[in-house]
Amino acid sequence: MRECSMISVKDAVNAALDWAREIYADTELQHLRVEEIKLSEDEKSWSITLGWIEPAVRSNAITLANVNGTLQKLPRVYKIFEVDAETGSVRSMQIRQATHVRSGAWG
């Protein structure tokens, strides 16, 4: 176990959410939510994956729905935020590609 103090998972999530809202201040992060949380093996950082629907992605999906006459599920954008487990500062943000799992495909 680490000797220094570690921020809580809730504080790490809030740091990632605040950072995303600040970086994308001019963009409406619609349906913003926490997707994944992981503490590194050395307990030095939290990886927080956030997901949302960006307006550009939403507009393209709506256009496709209008042209095809069918409704499509809007694609989500995923970002991984690395949060320092001691200080709570966000160290990095990366794009996370969504993986699709077929239902019933467990092995």
Image (cartoon, rainbow, N blue to C red):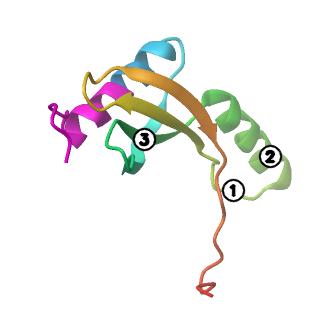
Range of residues picked out in magenta? 1-16
Q: Residue at x 42, y 14 (%)?
A: 22
Residue 87 within the magenta-colored segment of the rendering: no
Quarter of the picture holding the C terminus: bottom right
**Along the line of sight, which residue is nearer the eye, 22 or 6?**
6
In the image, is 86 to the left or to the right of 83? left
| Labels 2 and 3: the sequence-earlier one | 3
- Residue that numbered label 3 is attached to: 47
The x, y position of residue 24, in whole percent, is: 51, 17
Kindly state the secondary structure of the residue where label 2 is placed: helix
Q: Which of labels 2 and 3 is toward the front?
A: 3
Q: Which of labels 3 and 1 is toward the front?
A: 3
Residue 96 found in image quarter:
top right
Kindly state the secondary structure of the residue where label 1 is placed: loop
- Residue that numbered label 2 is attached to: 64
Cα distance in 3D space between marks 2 and 3: 34 Å
Is there a contact, CB below 8 Å, between mark 1 and mark 2? Answer: yes
On screen, residue 26 above or below 79:
above
| Disc on res. 72 | 1
Identify residue type, mark 3: Ser
